[in-house]
Image (tube, rainbow, N blue to C red):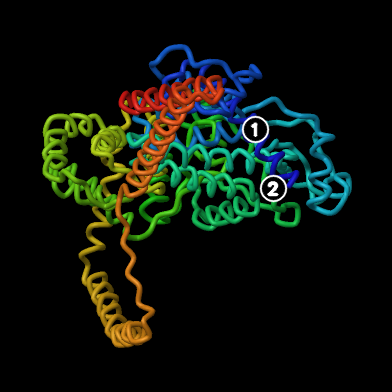
Amino acid sequence: MYRTISKRVGNAVRLAEVVQVLVRYGFSDVVHRLGLHEGLPAKVLRGLRLIEAPSGEPETQGRRLRAALTELGPTAVKFGQILSTRPELVGGEMAKDLGLLQDRVRAIEFEKLKPVIENELGAPVADLFFEFNEEAVASASLSQVYRATTRTGKHVAVKVQRPGVRRIIESDLVLMRSIAEWIAERVPDVAWMNPVGTVDEFARSVKRELDFGIEARIIEQFRKNYEGDPQIFVPRVYTELSSERVLTMDWVEGVRVDDIAQYGRYRSNPHTVAVTGADTLCKQVFEHRFFHADPHPGNILLIGENRIAFLDYGMVGSLEETDTATIADVLRAIFRQDAESAVQAMLQFTTSGETDDYSALVHEVADYIAFDAQAIISTGEVGKAIERLTAIMRKYRLQLAPRVSLLMKALATVESTGRALDPEIDMVPIIQPYVERIVAHRFSPAQLAREARQNMALFVRMGRQVPGDVSHLMRMLRAGKLKIQLNHEGINHLAAAIDRASNRVTVGLITGAIIVGSSLLLTADIGARTLGLSGFIFAGLLGLSLVISILRSRDI
């Protein structure tokens, strides 16, 4: 009981802090729309001076949201980074601003993290490593990274999870889920974005990131995919020095890939590295179907002779074979100026898979392909062309599947990094061969025969299941256990409206009864005049509150 009350109080205070930060950065319009400034909790917290009345600029911008999320801490920063992959939800400009969120915080002293290493690995640090530099080389909201040397003389990077961060994030996730449910119920304009689903997706992502064992397996998969590739280096994970909260891997010596001034010292060429990075992402998407979803310059190191290494495998994406075929269909449709095929392919990537105004969508995409897409692609900006197409989908309230949003972000990031190295880079000749190979493979005799076998097996399986399903339905019908459930959209709102109306009728009847009773007391000479006057006053207050309630509901 005590823990439950304590948890609710903690959530209320944290909510007050969120509201206060949003207001301070000029998001009072959001606070008003979400109704966070109303209700008894807000009044109590405002009375305690924990939150202030909403004020500030009504216009919201990505840079102010970025600053607000940074101040709100690790969970908010991670959520902003996830939103940066969803331009169809927040818009292209907002997504770009959120993409600049840096998960960098002040490092805490090593003595606080040392117990984490020793508890996780079961031995003192001095016994685990030959040498351990206690000064952090990198510090983020979830973890800190140290340089060390193993007992076998290998130089390694040791990533250690901050103590207590899991508890903070889990608490914030509960609050975010509650806010998402509130928004879904009270803000119809945002309901199509599926705020609860977005928060659930984020929760799954951040919980994976909290388990370094998952990241270790991801790194090993990338290492297997690039085994023998002379252009890509993937660090090795030392499993005997790793756990759920500690990750030890090869130390990678190099410079940021966008540090062009160092290219001469590393015997490398910016154009070659730009092409390598773009081709690598294409290979990850179309061949491996397992890609690095955050390949910004800080996560790519140049290690010499045009060789690069990816860092931070916390955010990755995976695709099905059908996904790669659909991506190829989208790009091929844009190249061939086929609007309807482009729309049909993009709809396969949406959560709903359909739109209420298909003809208008096709017409708008046709205009875009005819007047804008070809001009954009002619400059080699494939990522920008797809981003504009995504913006059109957002206009029609179509939400992309999370895996596709990650891919769009990765493509845009690699393209912008490539242009920073070589402004003349053209993505079309890099990506087009992969698209052509996917299309050729789809229509090859071997693939067509494989699909035919799969479809035949599906029909056979369905044929075997149908008699059993029919028999089961008949048994339930005979036993009287067959139930049909109907879901009526908006029935909850209707029930609430009926409930409010009945409450008002009840208050009106009580008010009328008090007025009649008070009148009888005043006319009867029984010495109850004071009680009669009190009844009139009480009835007047009830009537006034009823009128105010009706007027307020009409304003809404």
**Where 382 sits versus 474, above or below?**
above
Measured as percent of width and height from the top left, residue 114 is found at 82, 40
Which type of secondary structure does the marked residue at label 2 adopt?
strand
Badge nearest the viewer, 1 or 2:
1
Q: Is 57 drawn above or below residue 143 in the view shown?
A: above
- Left/right placement of residue 153 relative to residue 425 reads right
Indicate whether 552 appears above or below 402. Answer: above
Residue found 22% across the figure and 67% down from its top: 444
Q: Toward which corner of the image does residue 451 lie, by quadrant? A: bottom left
Nearer-N-terminus badge (1/2): 1
Q: Which residue is under mark 2?
A: 247
Foreground of the two, 370 or 127: 370
- Residue 408, picture quadrant: top left
Write the residue at 49% across / 43% down. 199
Q: Is residue 111 left or right of residue 475?
A: right
Q: Nearer the viewer, residue 373 or 420?
A: 373
Q: Tag 1: Cα neighbours inside 10 Å, few (<14), some, or many (≥20)?
A: some
The residue carrying pointer 2 sits among few (fewer than 14), some (14 to 19) or many (20 or more) residues within 10 Å by Cα, namely: many
Say what amino acid the circle numbered 1 marks.
Ala
- Tag count in the figure? 2
**Pointer 1: what residue?**
140
- Residue 183: give x, y in percent of width and height: 43, 36
Badge 2 amino acid = Leu
Residue placed most toward the observer, 52 or 215: 52
Disc 1 + disc 2, Cβ < 8 Å: no
Left or right of residue 203: residue 345: left
